[in-house]
Amino acid sequence: MKSPCVAKCKNNDGICSGCLRTMKEVIEWQSFDDIKRESVMAEIKGQPDTHFCPECHEPAHCDISAGKATCWCFELDKRDTTDCPSGRCLCRQCLSKQPLA
Ligand SMILES: [Zn+2]
């Protein structure tokens, strides 16, 4: 089975610090089909990119911008993003490094 798991799984308040999947994605991974798995793995890398992360300026994927009703970031414990430039979501890597709100 395809998986982005790098055997460093640690629940970092809702997101895996190793592979940057949300805990929901980790739990549901087995029930995803390959198409869904590949799309999640691409989204983790910011593809298709909806914007650039305001912190690291790498491509980032926001589910809301992509037209979905919810976003992967809703699964995380709320982060303190008051220091971040407003308007744009952080990528998974950067958001996971922010302190909890
Ligand atoms: Zn970033």
Image: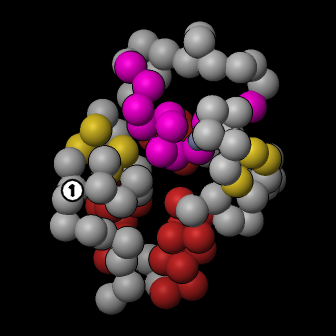
Locate residue 4, reporting x and y percent.
Answer: 38, 72
Percent of width and height locating residue 33: 47, 84
Asked if residue 47 can be seen in this view, the reply is yes
Quarter placement of the C terminus: top left
Q: Is residue 70 something one can see in this rendering? A: no
Q: Which residues are magenta?
A: 88-99
Q: Amino acid at mark 1?
A: Cys
Which quarter of the figure has residue 100? top left
Q: Is residue 41 above or below residue 15?
A: below
Q: Residue at x 56, y 18 (%)?
A: 81
**Pointer 1 residue:** 9
Q: How many marks?
A: 1
Identify whether 12 is placed above or below 87. Answer: below
How did the renderer colour the structure?
Answer: secondary structure
Judge from the rendering whether residue 12 lies leftward or rightward of residue 70; answer left or right.
left
- The yes-or-no answer for disc 1 within 8 Å of ligand 1 is no
In the rendered structure, does residue 75 fall within the stretch colored magenta? no
Return the x and y of residue 16 as percentages of the image width and height.
31, 50
Residue, x 73% and y 65% (percent of image)?
48
Q: Quadrant of ligand 1?
A: top right
Residue at x 68% of width, y 65% of height: 47
SS label for mark 1:
loop
Residue 68 in the figure: left or right of residue 20: right
Relative placement, left or right, of 69 versus 98 is right
